[in-house]
Image: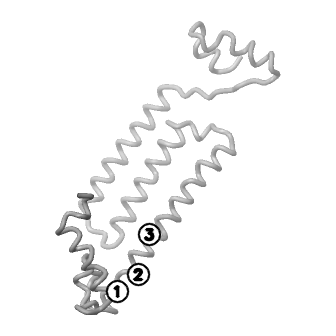
């Protein structure tokens, strides 16, 4: 008898499930958490939320974000491992689940590397990156770049860009 059979007799889950498992020669064992486990995790999450708010009132300099992210990571780990039952899941599912965070981390790594590299644009060009091509002084009237962007401005003025 599985823990699911014991937890839900007569509710359609327990009856027939063991007969199915016996007929196919395998047993499905599902982990069922008790209410005290969920309440305990909930209380820990409340304490960590209060800690996050408390820490936000202090200036730790450049470590403010790191401290907040560390607390958030602990909270996310608790939710994922207990409420999503990853703690009791198969090893291959854990590997796939955790590898998705590896790729998310790589995405953020490259995004932040790009943001950090943009700081050098101000030093190299003595100005931030322009938001409008007309702000680029090297592309003055008569240059091919200026003519290229002017054609789009003319289309917008004539209404051709909108499909009219």
Identify which residue, 65 or 161, lies in the foreground. 161
Specify few, some or many for label 2: CA neighbours under 10 Å numbering under 14, 14-19, or 20 or more. few
* Contact between labelled residues 2 and 1, with CB atoms less than 8 Å apart: yes
Which percent across, then down, holds residue 155? 23, 70
112 is higher (above) or lower (below) than 51: below
Q: Which residue is mark 1?
A: 121
As drawn, the residue found furthest toward the left would be 157
- Mark nearer the N terminus (2 vs 3): 3
Which percent across, then down, holds residue 5? 64, 15
8 is higher (above) or lower (below) than 48: above
Q: Which residue is mark 2?
A: 117
What is the CA distance from the residue labelled 1 to the residue labelled 3?
Answer: 16 Å
Q: Quick one: quadrant of the C terminus?
A: bottom left
Residue 22 picture quarter: top right
- The residue lying at 58 percent from left, 14 percent from top is 8
- The disc placed on residue 23 is none
9 is higher (above) or lower (below) than 85: above
What is the CA distance from the residue labelled 2 to the residue labelled 3?
Answer: 10 Å
4 is higher (above) or lower (below) than 142: above
What is the CA distance from the residue labelled 1 to the residue labelled 2?
Answer: 8 Å
Q: Which residue is mark 3?
A: 111
Identify which residue, 76 or 59, lies in the foreground. 76
- Element at badge 1? helix
Specify few, some or many for label 3: CA neighbours under 10 Å numbering under 14, 14-19, or 20 or more. few
- The residue lying at 71 percent from left, 16 percent from top is 1
Residue 61 picture quarter: bottom left
């Amino acid at each position: 008898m599985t823990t699911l059979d014991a937890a839900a007799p007569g509710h359609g889950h327990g009856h027939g499930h063991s007969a199915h498992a016996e007929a196919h020669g395998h047993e499905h064992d599902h982990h069922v958490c008790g209410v005290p486990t969920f309440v305990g995790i909930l209380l820990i999450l409340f304490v960590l939320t209060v800690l996050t708010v408390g820490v936000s009132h202090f200036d730790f300099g450049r470590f403010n974000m790191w401290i907040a992210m560390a607390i958030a990571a602990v909270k996310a780990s608790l939710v994922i491992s207990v409420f999503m039952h990853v703690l009791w899941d198969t090893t291959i599912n854990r590997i796939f689940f955790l590898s998705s965070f590896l790729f998310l981390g790589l995405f953020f790594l490259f995004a932040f590397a790009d943001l950090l590299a943009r700081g050098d644009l101000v030093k190299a060009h003595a100005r931030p990156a322009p938001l409008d091509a007309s702000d680029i002084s090297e592309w003055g009237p008569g240059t091919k770049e200026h003519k290229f962007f002017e054609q789009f401005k003319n289309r917008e003025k004539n209404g051709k860009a909108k499909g009219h």
